[in-house]
Amino acid sequence: YFASKNNNYKAPLSKSLLLVPSAISILLTLLFQHYQKFFAYNLQAIKEDFQIWRLVCGRAICLDLKDTFCSSLLIYNFRIFERRYGSRKFSSFLLGAWTLSALFDLLLVEAAQYVFGITINSLPSGFLGPVFALFVPFYCSIPRVQVTQILGFFSITNKTLVYILGLQLLTSGSYIWILALSGLISGICYNSSILKVHRILCVPSWVAKIFSWTLEPIFSSAEPTNEIRVGMGATVDIQRQQRMELLDRQIMMSQVAQMRRQRQQQGGMINWNRLFPPLRHRHNYQDHHPSDQDTPPPTEVSEEQVARLMEMGFSRGDALEALRASNNDLNVATNFLLQH
């Protein structure tokens, strides 16, 4: 990983992808228009003149400010993957998606010419293939939480805005659907456990260390404090739920600190099942403390979630106990393992 598990929150790679290409795109649009030709995604020059450098430059910087704005917002939302999996694995996914999508761009252009008779000499520039590829893990691994409903039929979830941004980016150019399709295919191929692409297209550890030394000091930020701010919900019910979740987290953190002090004095493992009672008992926490008879049997833990926590650097034992304590809630388990 670029950094230790405590530094995953900083997401230096996501910040660099958000700021650097956007700044270059703005400069090229406003001040250095005569240099835009070097960042054009010219397929004809790549195939006929073998200008391979255009494949790199043309797929790095957006020349359209609308594409720059939408892709920057998407990268900002997708930074959750760098915080969850670590910078090295996140950068390996981007590298694999970028490489595969470049290949699929050429194949789809040839297929469009063969099937529909469409000659495509250039495509929209920018880091768009990997951005569309990130929709694959976003769809598969981010849980869908309903926020509200419109007219009682259309559900608004925590993922709706991201999909709207993706749709806006998809409709911003005439041939951008090729980049979107190649990005989605590359994301599926990289995530596939059958093809094993992630074992071939990955960032070496020594490269990860170099970027850790260079990117982290520049794009570092302060870690969040234990005082978790309550966001303003869209309805009174959402605000009430957020306050309950805040109270629940504060109770668990105080219990963690107390039990860790006892373990340092007495030794032994933390009894997470006693430490984190189920949520349905915590609503009356101020009235009474849950007894040992109220403790439910241990929760069956998903091996996939255990593997995800182990990939972030936690031991298998800590991952199992945290997932049992949080009722298989990966986000809650990750937060407490990071903070303690």
Image: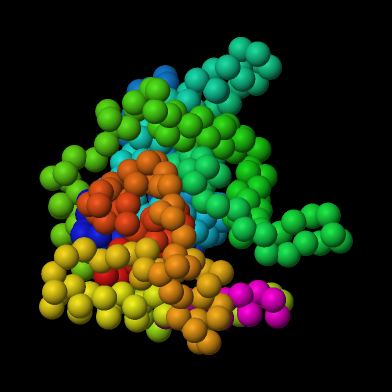
Instruction: Give the dominant element type of the magenta stretch: helix, strand or loop.
Output: helix
- Answer left or right for 213 relative to 117: left
Q: Quadrant of the C terminus?
A: bottom left
- Image: magenta residue range: 236-250
In the image, what residue occupies the spot 42% across and 80% down? 250
Residue 163: horizontal and vertical position, in percent? Answer: 63, 51
Q: Residue at x 65, y 47 (%)?
A: 167
**Can the viewer see residue 185?**
yes
Does the magenta-highlighted stretch encompass residue 246? yes
Q: Residue at x 25, y 66 (%)?
A: 270
- Vertically, is 82 above or below 289? above
Is residue 135 shown above or below 49?
below
> Along the horizontal axis of the image, is 315 left or right of 32?
left
- Left or right of residue 55: residue 284: right
Residue 23 showing in the rendered view = no
Q: Residue at x 56, y 37 (%)?
A: 180
Q: Position of residue 302 (x, y in %)?
A: 42, 44
